[in-house]
Amino acid sequence: MKKFVLAASVLASAFTPIVAGASVSRAASVPGCIVSLSPTATESLYAIGAGSQVKAVDLDANFPTTGLPRTRIDAFNPSVEAVASVCPVSKSHPSSKPDLVIISYDANSIKQQLTAAGIRVIEQDAAQNLSDVYAQINQLGTLTGHVANAAHVVMMMKNQIAGAIKSIPAHAGKVLTGYFELDQTYYSLTGDTFIGALMASLGIVNIANAAASPTDYGYPQMNSEYIVSSSPKVIFLADTLCCHQSATTVAGRPGWSTISAVKNHHVIALNDDVASRWGPRVSLLVGQLATAVRFAYVDKKVWK
């Protein structure tokens, strides 16, 4: 659950890292050594062509699948010493301290500690909406000297997401209920979260909304009986990698064979990482959600 609260192909190929230097201004302020303690920021940095400037990443960074630096730092238990000794010392970079550190979670008050050590830190918290996503990518473009590349990535994302939303067919009178599973203990998310808002933009009525309380902070833990009785028409599994869940394992749960999504084969397996991050691959996630919605709306069995 931690990775979700702190918050998988044509679309993927659209974010093959842009050639480093394509739009780089070699001003003295452009960082030559970056530490990214956010998997989402790492994805964005490589997508905009700043990968060669990244010298260390956190333990959870795994995209792009090649080219990431070997140096890893635990973002949930970071130390100033580990971060401050990352950079190769050279004539152009006479200090081992990074020029820029990007975090999404201020563990160990690392932001204050690094700032006190003279290291610039930028915190990019989990996005609340698509505007936040675009703003963070553009910010990274400005910080790293890849302004044009960042703008290009954002434009592509906007076009792909708009196309996915536009692809949803007219569905007058049809209420498409959905359940988004974070793990097999039935943690889910509501419309107050980033992913929940994406679901709502596609017309999905989230069954977690009615089951949540303010103390859940958008991530309620439901029970099997509630999910079965709600009988959502689509189910999204974001626990396929961590917990090996699938349409088959879901169908084998007691009582779940009666759920509309299970009976009619609308259980969608997502990539955990894509579903828990808010970088360039958000457009891939929206595309997957939209495809599932389209199929559900046109499936006559769902609406009998």
Image (spheres, rainbow, N blue to C red):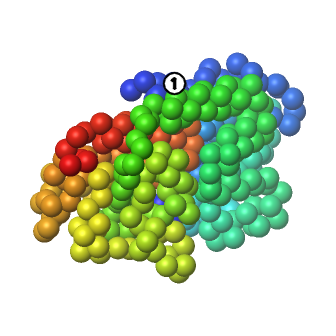
The quarter of the displayed image where residue 169 is located: top left
Residue 129 visible in rendering: yes
**97 vs 90: above or below:** below
Residue at 53%, 80% in the rendered image: 215
State the image coordinates of residue 129 (x, y, percent, origin top left). Answer: 62, 51
**218 vs 73: above or below:** below
Residue at 79%, 36% in the rendered image: 142
- Binning the other alpha carbons within 10 Å of mark 1 as few (below 14), some (14 to 19) or many (20 upward) gives some
The quarter of the displayed image where residue 229 is located: bottom left
Residue toward you, 89 or 51: 51
Amino acid on which the number 1 mark rests in the picture? Ala
Residue 35 visible in rendering: no
Mark 1 = which residue? 14
Residue toward you, 223 or 48: 223
Residue toward you, 277 or 120: 277
Number of numbered tags placed on the structure image:
1
Q: Residue furthest front?
A: 173
State the image coordinates of residue 247 (x, y, percent, origin top left). Answer: 20, 50
State the image coordinates of residue 48 (x, y, percent, origin top left). Answer: 64, 30
Residue at 83%, 57% in the rendered image: 118
